[in-house]
Amino acid sequence: MSWAGAEDTFLSTSLASYLDKKLLVLLRDGRKLLGLLRSFDQFANVVLEGACERVIVGDLYCDIPLGLYVIRGENVVLIGELELGKEELPPHMTLVPEAEIKRAQKAERDATDLKGSMRKRMEFLDFD
Amino acid sequence: MLFFSYFKELVGREVTVELKNDLAIRGTLHSVDQYLNIKLENTRVVDQEKYPHMLSVRNCFIRGSVVRYVQLPPEGVDVELLHDATRREARGG
């Protein structure tokens, strides 16, 4: 396989034009990873340097540092180029420490679980 | 290869790509490859409120395997041409 020239890269679907840029990688489980794209292949396996996970719960968010990540392509949904100099998130969202976002995340998870189990118990009522 | 060729014809057009996770993204089709991976430019998410993390994404790469639908501009669809091409392909080239 030969390396495409700069012009080909620009017009192709290859991830080469995203190399060394800060990207947002959306995964199939809904997680959002941020980091610098250092490598990729035809399956969209990617290597992110300085990766962090962006956890968003309601209006709160936190970036949890992860380090160097190799992501298997099948888990990738979308790779987005982050526009430099632009607010990454809407202004009404607040950055909170990791411990707080973990708490919020757990509270949210518990609420969904509760809703699920209540639904299960009420199933005989046959709503929908 | 038919749909690959077809999508190549649509490069430069405005399309909406709906993903299997219900995220719908509208943007200009920049390129497409054999796996039907798609690159979009000037993207905006249809339901912006629900996906705040997508706010500063202007260009993106979408893996072909996660696409549910691609909504095309009506003038971009030549059903007659597609029909003929399908028959040609079925006959073996």
Image (cartoon, coloured by chain):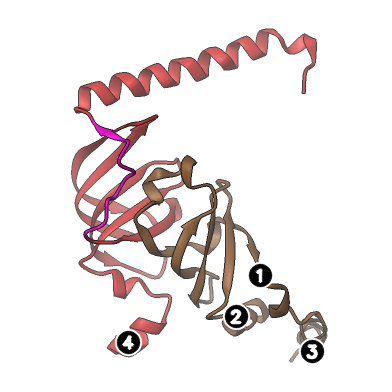
Between the C-alphas of marks 4 and 2, the distance is 23 Å
Residue, disc 2: B10
Within 10 Å of disc 4 (Cα), the crowding (few <14, some 14-19, many 20+) is few
The three-letter amino acid code for the residue at tag 2 is: Leu
Characterize the local packing of mark 3: few (<14), some (14-19) or many (20 or more) Cα atoms within 10 angstroms.
few
* Chain of the residue on which disc 4 is drawn: A
Asked if badges 1 and 2 are on one and the same chain, I answer yes
Judge depth for marks 4 and 2 and give the one in front. 2
Q: Can you identify the residue that label 3 sits on?
A: B88
Residue A10 position, x and y percent, is 35, 82
Residue for badge 1: B72
CA separation in Å, label 2 and label 3? 21 Å
**Disc 1 or 3, which lies upstream in sequence?**
1
Give the Cα distance between marks 1 and 3.
23 Å
According to the colouring, which chain is brown? B
**Chain that is red in the image:** A
Give the quadrant of residue B15: bottom right
Q: Describe the element under mark 1 as helix, strand or loop.
A: loop
Query: From the viewer's perspective, is residue A98 above or below residue B62?
Result: above
For badge 1, the amino acid type reads Leu
Looking at the rendered image, the quarter that the C terminus of chain A falls into is top right
In this rendering, would A58 be left or right of B7?
left
Whether residue B89 appears in magenta in the rendering, the answer is no
Image coords of residue A51 (percent x, y): 22, 49
- Assess whether mark 2 and mark 1 are in contact (beta carbons under 8 angstroms): yes
Q: Which chain carries label 2?
A: B
Q: Name the residue under label 4.
A: A4
Where residue B7 sits: x, y (%)? 60, 78
Q: What element carries label 4?
A: loop
Residue at 40% in and 51% down: B54
Q: Which of the 4 quarters of the picture holds residue A19?
A: bottom left
Spatial separation of the CA atoms under disc 1 and disc 2: 8 Å
